[in-house]
């Protein structure tokens, strides 16, 4: 595990303004069209009001920035409302204690336990040939609470880098 809290993007990293939306060519074109239209409307309103050139340019720029900014804000709000889960092989009791710590801080979290199932023992292993696997326990939290979850995990000695 990396000890860095925020990994540095590599040389081929791409800036992605959206976390949940994946616009295609039509989506990007619609967003660009809305930005251009909004910018022209802002500059046109400044022209009709008889404002100076600098103010018209500022109104046009603000109008052009508004649609993409609104789309990014809406996308981040949606992402914050989604849930993430993380499991690190801890027993159910440890995850339960962390859930209680999170709830004490006002964070909505829960423990999810999936049955482990069964697997065939490797060749040459003593009987029984079919072994029960331990249950898989994970911590489920809202993305908006990622910082608090990371802090509680760190306070409990769990060094994990939560997905961004």
Image (cartoon, grey):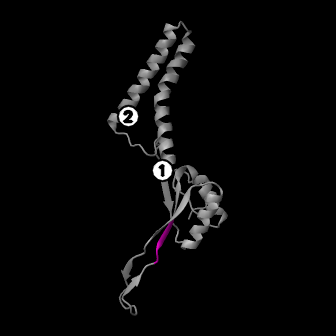
Q: Name the residue at 46% across, 32% down.
A: 68
Question: Nearer the N terminus, badge 2 or badge 1?
Answer: 2
Q: Residue at x 53, y 68 (%)?
A: 88
Q: Is residue 41 visible?
A: yes
The disc at residue 31 is none
From this viewpoint, which residue is outermost toward the right?
A: 155
Asked whether 150 falls inside the magenta stretch, the response is: no
Confirm whether residue 4 shows in the render.
no
In the image, residue 36 lies at what x, y percent?
A: 42, 23
Rendered location of residue 44, percent (x, y): 46, 13
Q: Position of residue 139 (x, y in %)?
A: 53, 63
Expressed as whole percent of the image width and height from the top left, the position of residue 97 reads 61, 68
- 57 over 115 or under it: above or below: above
Task: Give the labeled residue for mark 1.
Answer: 82
Instruction: Look at mark 2 in the image and give the residue it sits on.
Output: 28
User: As rendered, which of 73 and 60 lies closer to the eye?
Assistant: 73
User: Do residues under tags 2 and 1 come within 8 Å of each other at their CB atoms?
Assistant: no
At x 45%, y 17%, the residue is 41
Q: Which residues are magenta?
A: 134-138
Q: In the rendered view, does 157 fall on the left or right side of 87? A: right
Tell me the crowding category of disc 1: few under 14, some 14 to 19, or many 20 or more residues within 10 angstroms, Cα based: few
In depth, the one of 101 and 164 nearer the eye is 101
């Amino acid at each position: 595990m990396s000890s860095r809290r925020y990994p540095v993007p590599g040389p081929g990293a791409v800036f992605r303004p959206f976390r949940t939306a994946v616009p295609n060519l039509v989506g990007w074109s619609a967003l660009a069209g809305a930005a251009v239209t909004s910018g022209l409307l802002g500059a046109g309103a400044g022209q009709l009001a008889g404002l100076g050139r600098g103010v018209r340019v500022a109104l046009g720029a603000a109008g052009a920035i508004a649609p993409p900014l609104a789309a990014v804000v809406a996308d981040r709000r949606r992402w914050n409302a989604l849930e993430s889960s993380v499991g690190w092989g801890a027993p159910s009791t440890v995850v339960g204690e962390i859930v209680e710590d999170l709830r004490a801080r006002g964070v909505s979290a829960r423990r999810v336990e999936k049955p482990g199932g069964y697997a065939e023992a490797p060749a040459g292993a003593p009987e029984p040939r079919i072994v029960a696997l331990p249950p898989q326990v994970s911590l489920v939290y809202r993305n908006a609470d990622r910082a608090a979850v990371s802090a509680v995990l760190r306070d409990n000695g769990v060094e994990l880098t939560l997905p961004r």
